[in-house]
Image (tube, grey):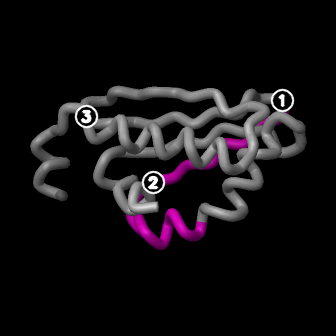
Amino acid sequence: MAWRSALSKNLQELRIHLCQTSQGSAGARDFLLSSYAELKKANPTFPILVRECSGVEAKLVARYDFGVEEAVKIDGLGKADVSKQLEALVKRGEQMPRSTESEGAL
């Protein structure tokens, strides 16, 4: 689970879009309930934005340096699969170009 502490090093921001009631967002809600506190503890100043909207399709949106964003649909996935998708986004951030501000923060 070392990738969890790399969240703030490889990404600039994480947005989680989900519906409060839909079955498709159940995995995203379960992931948030079980992992949010741990993610914030490992990355206290990192912005994790939770966006709830009725009927929206669940997805993760990672923002990297230079405003590059990547979105992954997580609608219908379970808690473990949501975690794997987030891990993949974090690992992709290792390969992304970094701004001088980010390199100084490492």
Residue bearing the label numbered 3: 95
The picture places residue 14, in percent across and down from the top left corner, at 48, 44
Q: What is the CA distance from the residue labelled 3 to the residue labelled 2? A: 21 Å
Q: Amino acid at mark 2?
A: Pro
The picture places residue 24, in percent across and down from the top left corner, at 82, 34
Quadrant of the rendered image containing residue 4 = bottom left
Q: Which mark is residue 47?
A: 2
The picture places residue 68, in percent across and down from the top left corner, at 34, 27
**83, 60: nearer the viewer:** 83
* Residue drawn at (79%, 39%) of the image: 25
Quadrant of the rendered image containing residue 66 = top left
| Crowding near the residue tagged with mark 1, few <14, some 14–19, many ≥20 C-alpha atoms within 10 Å | few
For numbered disc 2, what is the local secondary structure? loop
For numbered disc 3, what is the local secondary structure? helix
Q: Residue furthest bottom?
A: 41
Instruction: Judge depth for marks 3 and 2 and give the one in front.
Output: 3
Q: What is the CA distance from the residue labelled 1 to the residue labelled 2? A: 24 Å
* Residue drawn at (40%, 36%) of the image: 63
Mark 1 vs 3: CB contact within 8 A: no
Q: Is residue 30 magenta?
A: no
* Residue drawn at (48%, 45%) of the image: 87
Q: What is the CA distance from the residue labelled 1 to the residue labelled 3? A: 34 Å
Query: What residue span does the magenta drawing correspond to?
Result: 37-54
Left or right: where does residue 74 sit relative to residue 38?
A: right
Sequence-first disc among 3 and 2: 2
Left or right: where does residue 21 sit relative to residue 81?
A: right
Quadrant of the rendered image containing residue 11 = top left
Residue bearing the label numbered 1: 55
Q: Is residue 41 magenta?
A: yes
